[in-house]
Image (spheres, grey):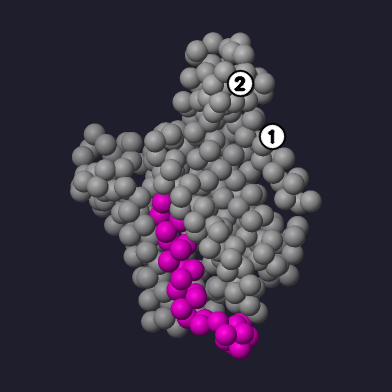
Amino acid sequence: MVALIGFGVLMASLTLAIGVGAVPIPAATVWGVIANKLAPGLVEQTWSAGREAIVWDIRFPRALLAVMVGAGLALVGASLQSVTRNPLADPHLLGISSGGAFGAILALLHTGLFLGTLTVPLFAFGGALMATAIVLGVARVADASTADRLVLAGVAVSFIVMALANTLIFLGDPRATHTVVFWMLGGLGLAQWSQLLYPLAILTTCGLWLWIRAPQLNAMTVGDETASTLGIAVDRFRLEIFVVGALITGVMVAFSGMIGFVGLMIPHIVRMVVGGDYRRVVPVSALLGAIFLLWADIAARTLMAPEDMPIGIVTGLIGGCFFIWLLRRNRS
């Protein structure tokens, strides 16, 4: 029932996200254009070529990218919170997003796209993986085994990696600086059909893998000893989750910039609704993450219209308030 309601809300949100803008487009036109593109001749064309271009070339790919990025970041947050037993675990707070941004900036400003359109996603994945390894190394060296200290280690690494990323921007082409800085604030305006295949492939593959691993994620939330008695190679499984999390985060950052706090907020809200069983938490987190980022993008496009506000500002404002509430709730 929750999944059906969520899917209905997702479709309604998708329709609104495509229809809202400087040129309002009715829902019937939105789905008419989409249906006619998928099956030419299925629907009688009653709209102009301009409206068709707005729906199909601009707003629909942007909305689909919002769905994929929101779902991906929520999945990473949910899985990290399980294997670290840390309610504050989030790819943004643990420095994984910063690592992805570092790799993407390195590719955009210094190495060039020598691998074509795969260059930025691969470099972002490499940067996210590097940041993850550093956070785990710092946590081990500093004996930061508790939940709060692991987050502190992640925040410290995030600052260092972002300082290095800013150095890359400083040393890069000044003409590209403004574009890269705007991209770092998070945005979905550069979404293109030709590039959506990469986040879709990663989200589908890794999301299914995480769903299959839901029983192990359930066991990890209880504790390492319990998970070990159930036959789980705890250290190896935790490492696998971090690598998958870095892969999802790196690819999403490559196409959307840094969008924080989705992975922190969504799993908490999902657990309040469907409980802590990861067989439900994984798919519902993906669904709610997609809906949340669609609405964040609607807010980013409409609050200061006709200006397109970076979506990272919207999620940062909401996520910061949620983080404070979470700290107060955990204290009480």
x 54%, y 67%: residue: 80
Q: Amino acid at mark 1?
A: Ala
The label on residue 42 is: 2
Determine the secondary structure under disc 1. Answer: helix
Is 146 above or below relative to 80? Answer: below
Is 261 above or below relative to 188? Answer: below
Determine the secondary structure under disc 2. Answer: loop
x 62%, y 38%: residue: 295
Instruction: Please give the range of residues in magenta.
Output: 223-252
* Mark 1, other Cα within 10 Å: few <14 / some 14–19 / many ≥20: few
- On the question of residue 185 being in view, the answer is no
Which tag, 1 or 2, sits closer to the chain's start? 1
Task: Give the image location of residue 49, x and y in percent.
Answer: 50, 13
Q: Is residue 302 left or right of residue 243?
A: right
Q: Which of the pair 87/276 is nearer the observer?
A: 276
- State the residue position of label 1: 12
Q: Which of the pair 261/235 is nearer the observer?
A: 235
Callout count: 2
Q: Which of the pair 89/330 is nearer the observer?
A: 89
Q: Is label 1 or label 2 in front?
A: 2
- On the question of residue 59 being in view, the answer is yes
